[in-house]
Amino acid sequence: MDDTKTLNSVRCDVSSCVHNVDGCACSADSIKVCCTCTSPDCADETLCRTFRARQQ
């Protein structure tokens, strides 16, 4: 990993995000994650609202 500051313990494999570092970490200052399902006890479908697409 380079010298980019990352969020401790936050692991992310979304390499198309500008905040992704080395395919496994997040360099955003903070993250916002929300649930996309209607059931209150559902943990299977979440969405990272911090995601920003990397320029191709």
Image (cartoon, rainbow, N blue to C red):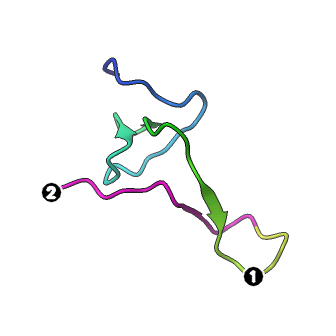
The residue at 32%/47% (across/down) is: 18
Residue occupying the far left of the picture: 56
Numbered range of the magenta stretch: 43-56
Does the magenta stretch mainly form a helix, a strand or a loop?
loop
**Amino acid bearing label 1:** Thr
Dot 1: element: loop
Residue occupying the far right of the picture: 41
Which of the image's four quarters has the N terminus? Answer: top left
Other-residue count near label 2 (Cα within 10 Å), few / some / many at <14 / 14–19 / ≥20: few
Label for residue 56?
A: 2
Residue occupying the far top of the picture: 3
Contact between marks 2 and 1 (CB within 8 A): the answer is no
Other-residue count near label 1 (Cα within 10 Å), few / some / many at <14 / 14–19 / ≥20: few
16 vs 20: above or below = below
**Quarter-wise, where is residue 46 in the image?**
bottom right
**Quarter-wise, where is residue 45 in the image?**
bottom right
37 vs 34: above or below = below
Residue occupying the far bottom of the picture: 38
**Amino acid bearing label 2:** Gln
Dot 2: element: loop
Residue 54 belongs to the span the image colors magenta? yes
Which of the image's four quarters has the C terminus? Answer: bottom left
**Quarter-wise, where is residue 20 in the image?**
top left
Q: Mark 1 or mark 2, which is nearer the start of the sequence?
A: 1
The residue at 59%/53% (across/down) is: 32
Residue 31 drawn at (x, y percent):
56, 47
Kindly identify which residue carries mark 1: 38
Residue 43 drawn at (x, y percent):
74, 64
Q: Give the CA separation, mark 2 to mark 1.
A: 34 Å
| Position of residue 15 in the picture relative to residue 13 (left or right) | left
The residue at 34%/49% (across/down) is: 15
3 vs 44: above or below = above
